[in-house]
Image: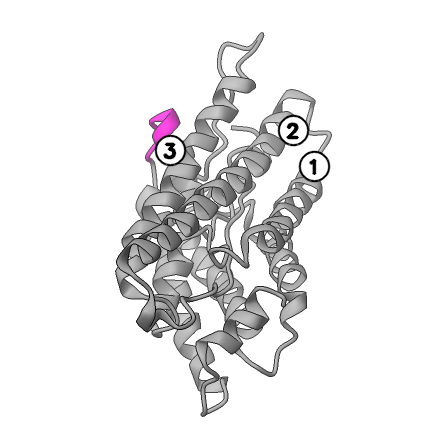
Amino acid sequence: MGEYSSRSGDVAISVTSKEEAGGGGTCKTGKYFLLFQKMVAELVGTYFLIFTGCAAIAVNNDYGKQITLLGIATVWGLVVMVIVYSVGHVSGAHLNPAVTIAFASITKFPLTQVPAYIAAELLGAILASGTVRLVFSGNHVEVQFTGTLPSGSNIQSFVIEFIITFFLMFVICAVATDSRAVGTLAGVAIGSTILINVLIAAQVSGASMNPARSLGPAFVHHEYRGIWIYLLSPTIGAVAAAWVYNILREKKDKPIIQITKNASFN
């Protein structure tokens, strides 16, 4: 595992998506199709998030660390920003089971859609990790592991993952659910947070912030050391941040359509 390879992390992201406006008159078929659209957006978005970030790690390993940690962090931040602007208006661009669960915990996302979102996010991450392994296993015996592993103790990785995911989710809640925020800057704010977090935590835990980001490569490479850290800590951190931001949010919540307008940059 190279200096920046398995330890350069990523994450994940998200903003709240468009809900079914006038849902009372929507037939079941229409609701299912809308959910299907969201699942496809989450799958595709998560796929390109994980593929791009892990591909940068693989290229860095193959070319003598020329991309560097700063370069890898920049790639993660930029791809998150691009995807938020690409599918944020369709699904909310969660791309991260921890974000989906956190939004559901504060009733900003339908609980019934959580399993579908998580399934799409995990499938996208697994497919992306498999693609990276296939594409970059050329003249080499095997592409190096591009997932996340603790470089120190488990407790160090657990704590840093909690902190950086809390930071990420706090920013997401601010730009996606608060009417006082400038929604059109959501992608920039979230992508910048990812970049900062990777620079801070990559050498400690891999800066995952996203259970799907860690589970995808782990599944493809059959490397599950410390995986419990990346499943639990980001989820706990995201939920905690969502609840803390509830204290700062205006007492009178804006309706879901207004949240959608901020989140989808209308």
Residue located at (43% from left, 38% from top): 125
Q: Secondary structure beneath disc 3?
A: helix
Question: Of callouts 2 and 3, which one flags the residue occurring earlier in the amino acid sequence?
Answer: 2
**Which of 249/54 is in front?**
249
**Residue carrying label 2:** 60
Q: Horizontal and vertical percent for residue 180?
A: 60, 83
Q: Does the stretch in magenta take in 219? A: yes
Q: Secondary structure beneath disc 2?
A: helix
Of the numbered discs in the image, which one, if any, rests on residue 68? 1
Crowdedness near tag 1: few (<14), some (14–19) or many (≥20) residues, C-alpha within 10 Å = some
Quarter residue 28 falls in: bottom left
Q: Horizontal and vertical percent for residue 120?
A: 37, 44
Q: Secondary structure beneath disc 1?
A: helix
**Real-space Cα distance between discs 2 and 3?**
19 Å
Of the numbered discs in the image, which one, if any, rests on residue 218? 3
Is residue 193 shown left or right of residue 46?
Answer: right
Amino acid on which the number 3 mark rests in the picture: Ala
**Which of 31/108 is in front?**
31
Crowdedness near tag 2: few (<14), some (14–19) or many (≥20) residues, C-alpha within 10 Å = many
